[in-house]
Image (cartoon, rainbow, N blue to C red):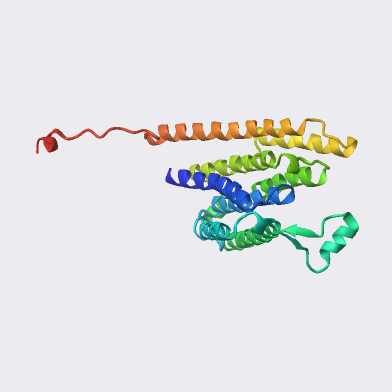
Amino acid sequence: MGMLFDHGLDATTAILMNVVLTRILNVGSGLPAILAIQISTVPFYYITMEEYYIGMLNLPMFTGPDDTSLFISGICFFCAYMGTGEYWTEHLEVPFGVGDLLHQKFGVEPTLKRSTYACYIIYCAEVSFILLGSAQKYWEARNESHFKERFTYTSFLLHGGYMCANILIYDIYGLLSGSDILHTHPRSVVFCFAGQYLQAVLRMIVANASGENFNPYRRTTLIAWGLMSINIASFILTDEALFDEKWLFRGINVMIWSAVAHYTYFVLQEFKVILNINIFTCVPKVANPQESSN
């Protein structure tokens, strides 16, 4: 029960901490906005999946609540000293002639904000450390009984492919379809992505504790992906969205986060019955009459 609370809160903190930090760094909208939320959520998903298959949690460098918290604290102190306005929004040239080439070929600005550079570098480092570390641990645990009990090629590919599919659908929609939603309503898109991550991670944490099979492809997820895919197809065929984008992502947010709240509530109620305990209940301590007389 303690693990469920601890890991569940960590999974939620990975979203909230990220949103606060991206605001401090003035990450802004567009590609950096969607990559920024993936910096914390993608590693957390694959670390949880690693625990599900291997049976133990062994964090690599630059992840988890310890070293990452120190890094974030350092960033906050640095921003307090330097100021977040001019420093992180200052534009720097893209090196090695890449910026000029992109500007000539695609009309892209040959400079990037300092916060955008930081986002790209941290994203590549964080995701690389996690994937390489997980691959090594899976290989080392391939003969362990827990891994053999949980592992099938189908389940492993479905579980590993869930976050890849989530990244693809959101990145294609926001960056390649012709939509400007990441510039007009970046927070709506970010919280939709985060909600689908959290929904899958919470179910995986519970499945790991209870020994159940884990299925991340819920109806709410498939509905969200389906609606977004329809708009992507509409952009390709007609150069405009079939569904109003602002209300589409608001609706997805309501659906996904309601599902997260519903699942959390009923899991807690079920564990209360199984363990015969009370949660979030304050019971006044009754004084011992003998102690009071003394």
Residue visible at 79% across and 30% down in the picture: 243
**In what quadrant of the picture does the N terminus appear?**
top left
Question: Looking at the picture, does residue 188 appear above or below residue 35?
Answer: above
Residue visible at 60% across and 42% down in the picture: 200
Q: Position of residue 69 (x, y in %)?
A: 52, 57
Q: How many marks?
A: 0
Q: Position of residue 277 (x, y in %)?
A: 37, 35
Q: Is residue 216 shown to the viewer in this render?
A: no
Q: Is residue 236 shown to the viewer in this render?
A: yes
Q: Position of residue 177 (x, y in %)?
A: 82, 43
Residue nearest the viewer, comparing 62 with 73:
73
Q: Residue furthest bottom?
A: 96
Residue 50, quarter of the rendered image: bottom right
Residue 258, quarter of the rendered image: top right
Residue 82, quarter of the rendered image: bottom right
Q: Does 246 sit left or right of 258 as displayed? A: right
Q: Position of residue 134 (x, y in %)?
A: 61, 59
Question: Looking at the picture, does residue 158 appear above or below residue 56?
Answer: above
**In what quadrant of the picture does the C terminus appear?**
top left
Residue visible at 71% across and 39% down in the picture: 185
Residue visible at 57% across and 35% down in the picture: 260
Residue nearest the viewer, comparing 63 with 54:
63
Q: Does 271 sit left or right of 174 as displayed? A: left
